[in-house]
Image (spheres, grey):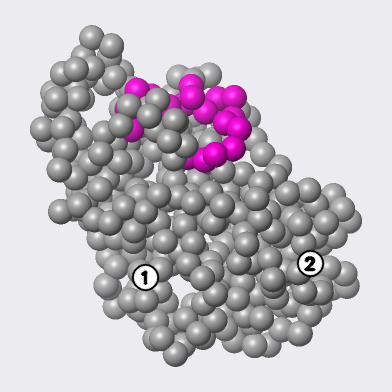
Amino acid sequence: MNRKIVYPDYKNCIANLPNSILKKFGAEPVGEPLAMAEPYLARPYRNVVVFLLDGMGKAILERHLPKDGPFRTNLKGIYTSTFLSTTVAATTSMMSGLQPCEHSWLGWDCYYPQIDKNVTCFYNFVQGTEEKAAEFNVPWTFTPYESVVEKIGKLGKNAVMYAPFWEPKTDSIREMCERVKTTLREPGEHYIYVYWNQPDGLLHRNGCGAEVVHETMLELEEAVSDFAAQTDRDTLVMVTADHGHMDTENVDIRDYPSIVDCLVRMPSLEPRVLNLFVKEEKKDFFVSEWNQAFGDRFLLLPMEEVIERKLMGTGRPHALFRQMLGDYLAIATGNLSIFYTGEHKWTSNHGSLVEDEMLIPFIVFD
């Protein structure tokens, strides 16, 4: 069954929030600001702290947290993720202020024409392996960007990003909040961006309704709201997410040899949105086979139509953007994920245009 589709709004999405932050700290924005953030950032706060809780979309927030709890009572609005609605694309937009077409970190696995390989972006591995894609970092070499933190730092102001897997590592959200408190005691203005990898990991493994997800959501809400309550009046705390989640069924594309035989290389991007390079002589046959197998739960678009519709952004595309994309994009409209590397077949997933994946919260402790 197809679900409600929500298209990215590049005037009201996660790529806009960092541009409001750049503006707040006197740096030059690279895109449009987020209108609903502007009234808060216009106030004379010395510090701005943003918590990004990976995977905590609108549907997950509403499913697991009470209406009268601190997150939902401080909810200032709902906006969209980027497309793809996935961590690589959306957090890169949060860190840079650029839209996916501009930064070209498009999905978990991206095709890099310079080395003719699909690369797992965050690990610099050949897709589906733990083999280095090259002796250099492929994504950072060919698709580098200057972060919001770097731009604010160049102005002589304090800007930092924290994540649980960076040294010193932590798996405690409360310990992370204490680290932020320590930084805020330092003199001067501060922008602090905190990336937290839950509930996303638990959602992938256990599904949207799992008890462990519920308990973790309550723990995150309590820790972050306690932190916000303990900060001085000169600190603005905002909470958001990169994307949502939905429970999915899973298949492996290698179980469809007639389709795989049409491909120049294995698909890339995400199991919910597949980038497909198709042999020229097989294109008509491929479209027929794909739609017969998946047409009820995936929308197959020629890549030129994807670009014309500006699904990955309205800004000026990166020089490599078109070269990284194939002939067709397959976008999930139902609850199916199509895996292509033998990786874990998650219980819950994201990346597509379905409402539960696309809508994210904007929470402000003002």
Please name the residue shown 36% across and 66% down the image: 202
Dot 2: element? strand
Judge from the rendering whether residue 78 lies leftward or rightward of residue 147; answer left or right.
Answer: left
- Could you tell me the amino acid type at mark 1? Ile
Residue under label 1:
60
- Could you tell me the amino acid type at mark 2? His
Please provide percent x and percent y for residue 332.
27, 45
Please provide percent x and percent y for residue 109.
42, 37
Judge from the rendering whether residue 315 lies leftward or rightward of residue 53; answer left or right.
Answer: right
Please name the residue shown 15% across and 53% down the image: 1
Q: CA distance from mark 2 to mark 1?
A: 30 Å
Report the magenta stretch's main SS.
loop
Give the camera-side residue of 65 and 77: 77
Q: Earlier in the sequence, mark 2 or mark 1?
A: 1
Please provide percent x and percent y for residue 165.
56, 59
The circle drawn on residue 190 is 2
Please provide percent x and percent y for residue 77.
51, 71
Q: Quadrant of residue 176?
A: bottom right
Dot 1: element? helix
Which segment did they paint magenta? 312-329
Image quarter where the C terminus lies is bottom right
Decide: is 182 above or below 360. Answer: below
Q: Is residue 343 visible?
A: no
Magenta stretch contains residue 292: no
